[in-house]
């Protein structure tokens, strides 16, 4: 779907994107994660043919020239553009007219459908200049969906939305993805990427420092976390398997939490909770980027 090879963009002495090899496969929900200023917008602009690379290669939907496949891509980049004095519907009508491939006969129905999808169905005729930032984001997303694209490229799509709005967009993007649309989005929010994406690329100072399926990144560590009022007793029962302890929480080396649970309960100790330990995306990102990566925002 999207591959880049050694993709680089310099602005004078600044290397905004530094030799990035992106690999986005058909059906992915790919989260491109990095702190502000790490080069996300510049990369998205290059994918859409809005900025020329300094060096390196891009292939989007099988084409080396993004402009050739733009009709199959829905996109939204920072601060979606709209005519401020016109209504959202009017803006979408103009956009639809400007593009190729949209049948006039079905235009009205398609516009109502995308407004519905993004939660703007009941919006009245007021001009876009009176919209909140969240409404503008939704309108930008509606515009991206107009041509039922195979690929969505979105730069910080939940910027300005409240938690409810973020959840709605997450559900919408998941539903679109499940019906066949590949989604590539940039974000500085770990929680957003963790909850939405199937694959993660982490960018730091223009460099891609990590690219992996989320399930693989969050694979079990091989430890089971047991919380018990009988932690002392359990610690005494274990034969060298206790890896760490934090009060009533025990970190036990064991491959199967269900089996361990059965053994503990069978041995007459009480278990308040038991889970296979998995690293959080935050831990994985911090390990990949080292100190200073706290600039990636861990909160929603
Ligand atoms: N047109 C430009 N001219 C000069 N420098 C630029 C230009 N565009 C971006 N940069 C610089 O390139 C670097 C990457 O910027 P970019 O906007 O791509 O990052 P970002 O990760 O999208 O950040 P944000 O989330 O804040 O938009 C920054 O240092 C920025 O100042």
Image: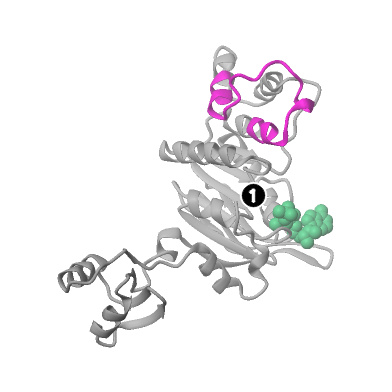
The magenta stretch is: 112-139
Q: Is residue 288 visible?
A: yes
Q: Nearer the viewer, residue 294 or 89?
A: 294
Rendering quarter of residue 252: bottom left
- Against 221, residue 57 (above or below) is above
Q: Nearer the viewer, residue 165 or 45?
A: 165
Locate residue 268 relative to residue 138 in the image: left or right: left
Q: Where residue 150 sits in the image (x, y, percent)?
A: 50, 38
Specify whether tag 1 is near ligand 1 (CB below 8 Å): no
Outermost bottom residue: 240
Q: Could you say which is closer to the camera, residue 123 or residue 209?
A: 123
The residue at the far top in this view is 105
Say left or right for 87 vs 182: right
Which residue lies at the image location 74% right of the left edge and 59% below the top edge? 37
* Outermost right residue: 12
Q: Is residue 52 something that shows in the picture?
A: no
Task: Report which residue position mark 1 lands on.
Answer: 47
**Residue at point 73% right, 20% down?**
87
Seen from the viewer's position, the closer of residues 87 and 11 is 87
Q: Quadrant of residue 133?
A: top right
What residue is rendered at 61% in x and 72% in y?
A: 289
In this view, the residue farthest toward the left is 266
> Is residue 124 covered in magenta?
yes
Magenta span contains residue 123: yes
Q: Is residue 231 left or right of residue 247?
A: left
Q: How many marks?
A: 1
Name the residue rendered at 65%, 67% in the picture.
Answer: 294
């Amino acid at each position: 779907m999207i591959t880049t090879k050694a993709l680089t963009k310099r602005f004078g002495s600044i290397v905004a994107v530094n030799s990035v090899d992106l690999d986005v496969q058909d059906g992915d929900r790919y989260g491109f994660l990095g702190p502000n200023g790490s080069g996300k917008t510049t990369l998205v602009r290059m994918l859409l043919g809005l900025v020329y690379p300094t060096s390196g290669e891009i292939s989007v939907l099988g084409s080396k020239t993004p402009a050739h496949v733009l009709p199959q891509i829905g996109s939204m980049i920072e601060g979606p553009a709209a005519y401020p004095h016109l209504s959202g519907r009017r803006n979408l009508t103009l956009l639809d007219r400007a593009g190729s491939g949209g049948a006039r006969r079905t235009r009205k129905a398609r516009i109502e459908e995308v407004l519905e999808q993004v939660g703007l169905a009941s919006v009245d005729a007021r001009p876009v200049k009176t919209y909140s930032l969240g409404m503008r984001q939704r309108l930008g997303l509606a515009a991206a969906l107009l041509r039922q694209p195979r690929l969505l490229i979105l730069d910080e799509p939940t910027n300005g939305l409240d938690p409810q709005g973020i959840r709605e967009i997450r559900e919408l993007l998941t539903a679109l993805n499940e019906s066949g649309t590949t989604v590539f989005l940039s974000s500085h929010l770990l929680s957003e990427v963790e909850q939405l994406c199937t694959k993660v690329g982490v960018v730091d100072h223009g460099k891609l420092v990590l690219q992996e399926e989320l399930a693989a990144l969050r694979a079990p560590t091989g430890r089971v976390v047991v919380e018990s009022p009988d932690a002392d007793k359990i610690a005494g029962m274990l034969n060298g398997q206790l890896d760490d302890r934090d009060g009533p929480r025990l970190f036990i080396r064991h491959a199967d939490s269900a089996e361990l649970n059965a053994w503990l309960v069978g041995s007459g100790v009480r278990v308040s909770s038991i889970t296979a330990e998995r690293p959080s995306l935050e831990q994985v990102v911090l390990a990949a980027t080292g100190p200073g990566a706290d600039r990636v925002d861990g909160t929603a």
